[in-house]
Amino acid sequence: MQATQTSFNPAIESEAGYGQIFAILLRRRFWVLGMLVAAIGVAALQTMRQAPTYVSSMQLLIESNYQGKQNGTNGNNGLENEFSDANVQADTGTQINLMQSSELLRQAMVLLQSDYPDINPDDPNSVAGFKGTIGIIQITQRTGKENVATKIFQIVHTGNDPVETQKVLEALKKVYLNYNLEQQKKRLDKGLAFVNEQLPQIKNKMQQAESALKQFRQNQELIDPDLQAKVQTEALYRIQQEQQTNQVQIRDLRSRFVSLQQQLALPPQDAIALSRLSQSTRYQNLLNEIQKTELLLEQQRLRFKDQTPFVQQLKNQRQRQLELLQTEIRRVLGSSSAISNSTAEQLLSQGQFGSLDQTLVGQLIDSQVNLQAAQARERSLNTIQQQLRSQLVRFPQLLAEYGRLQPEVQLSQETLKQLLKAQQDIGLEIARGGFDWQVVENPQLGAKTGPSLLRNLMVGAVAGLMLGGAAAFARESADDAVHSSDDLQKQVPLPLLGMVPELTIEAIGDDAPLLSLPFSKTRSLSPGIDRVIQWQPFRESLDLLYQNIQLLSRDQPFKSLVITSALAGEGKSTIILGLAISAARLHQRVLLIDADLRRPSLHKLLNLPNDRGLSTLLASDTPIPQQVDTQDSNLRSNISVVTAGPTPTDPAKLLSSERMRQVMETFEQNYDLVLLDAPPVLGMVDSMLVGACCNGVIIVGRIERVTRSELAQTTQMLNKLNVIGVVANGASHQTRNDRHYQQ
């Protein structure tokens, strides 16, 4: 039967989409990463070979101390506007020359001489060379259409060592600030004499008051008595609330404990002991044996007298069992338990604890533990309450003492603060005059101006990504393997009948969801293959494959199908077995034929003998059987198997014989579906010969194993046959619906 070949594939696009590009880059990520690392390494190596240069800078604010008087405001207000105030006449040229003076530079060189012995501050040429590395620039600010000079100066030093450039500016900063302080100190006079005389006395008085307050706090172990008294009062209130809650809980627990004890009608210790005995398997077994012995003894007493040897033997047996029961009780509970001293009859009655009694004992134990915990908490709360009350008694006297010491300290501090403010105000007035040098930006570690490692690394990274992408696509173009079901569908002009999921050890482990097979005994399969074909995703994919085949032949169903592949090891035998089970589950009578006469495998999967099979059936002249009697009775009646049989000398001759066509016609008349496991297409003609005798051919393609050229060659070799579609084996694609039903 020839079926119309309808391709389910869309037209093969000439350009790859973004998803395919991303998949290629992800698959070849090591090529991309390798080129990226190599390019970055080359860029870093090239940068390291270049001699570096570093520049460090700092900024100074140089302003006239008379500016505050001219503006009628404090010099600290409006500082941002003063930076670009053109109305202030400052001799900036003089200040620049002063900062570059040989005397100040020589002082900086003296500070640097300990770290850099090559510096000679006494050599005029060395001082001149040092001066050449120092640059001073006045910063300008854009105001409207003009650049207005500010009062901020940037000092720059260039060198070959970032630490050295920073240290040079640190030395200059120290020299400039010391010079500024010396100039201000010289302008001070004796205007602060009175304030300076009063300060020690006030400080001494304040220290005495603070010392007394400190001693009070140390002796009483208090920081703020007012706050701590409030905290203690709140804590006492919380304790009282907790006591009330705990007392209610104790009453509830005591009532529950008494109720449970009344229900059990046993002391707690006996109830716990009997609960432990009821949980002992050996104890329960002994009780059961004693009951059996007693039942047998009562039966024999109805027939014989007590003096009968058999009755005496049963009595002795019961006594020994009672002794073993007593021994087991001592082992579980110990000899000190009251239960251990009970009589045999009491033991027999006490040891029968039911599930309800067990539950009551557990609740009794929980109630007892909770009651003891609540009582312990009550004792703890009482202790804490007593401690809090004893501490609150002494607070009134402490508050009075604290109220006397605290105002003395505050008064002394306020007086000292006023004197210090007066000292500061007078000092500011005296210090007005000349110029004030302030550091706006501290010296930074020398910034590398060349070569730029970051820029070179970024260029290297971009180049590496481009080269890596090119290498990845080049490797992808050289790779002929099929990597996904989409690749398989685009490669062949055939419908994609189904996708069989990739099998992993985790997927077919003991925890994998399994389905029932149409076998009465699972040992009919080889180890491992039974879990594979029972794995739920595998079963669902084979059911979907079978339904797709049925849809292709809605008018006239396929009676015989050949399952083949381009290469060996692509899983066609496992798939054909699963396909047969799917058809059998739908009440189809299925015949499995192993048509691989060279390297048969179906008998190994099913643990069937292979001493006779298709080869012997084709080679003999015996009548063709209407039904195949499967040699393993573990298979159900709606699945039959014909193994390959012994390997013939010329398999192609047998498969191309008229006998083969007659066999297939007979089987097609007596079975709903005949499935043939054919050998690989490439390298031999057997699959083509088998396919010529059947209604349709299905190609199995193993993802990541079969190549595009092998698929194309296989399709070309089978183009004269009715190839109805391909199956992607080992596909990793999983829909959201699949994940939902597997949870």
Image (spheres, rainbow, N blue to C red):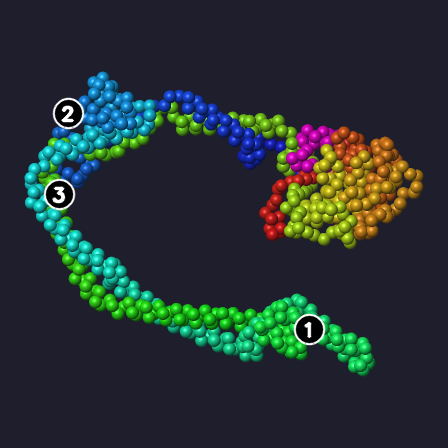
Q: Earlier in the sequence, mark 3 or mark 1?
A: 1
Toward the top, the furthest residue is 125
Could you give the CA–CA distance between mark 3 and mark 2, rounded to whole angstroms?
Answer: 29 Å
Q: Earlier in the sequence, mark 2 or mark 1?
A: 2
Q: Which residue is mark 3?
A: 424
Query: Callout 1 environment at 10 Å: few (<14), some (14 to 19), or many (20+)?
Result: few
Residue in front for this viewpoint, 388 or 507? 388
Residue at position x 16%, y 34% from top?
A: 181
Which residues are drawn in magenta?
699-718
The amino acid on which the numbered mark 3 sits, given as a three-letter code, is Gln
Residue in front for this viewpoint, 156 or 32? 156
**Residue 402's x, y, as percent?**
20, 62
Left or right: 304 as drawn, with respect to 348: right
Left or right: 13 as drawn, with respect to 645: left
Q: Are marks 3 and 2 in contact (CB under 8 Å)?
A: no
Q: Nearer the viewer, mark 3 or mark 2?
A: 3
Does residue 459 appear anywhere in the picture?
no
Q: Nearer the viewer, mark 3 or mark 1?
A: 1
Q: Which mark is residue 94?
A: 2
Seen in the picture, residue 158 relative to 522 is either above or below; the reply is: above
317 falls in the magenta region: no
Q: Which residue is mark 1?
A: 323
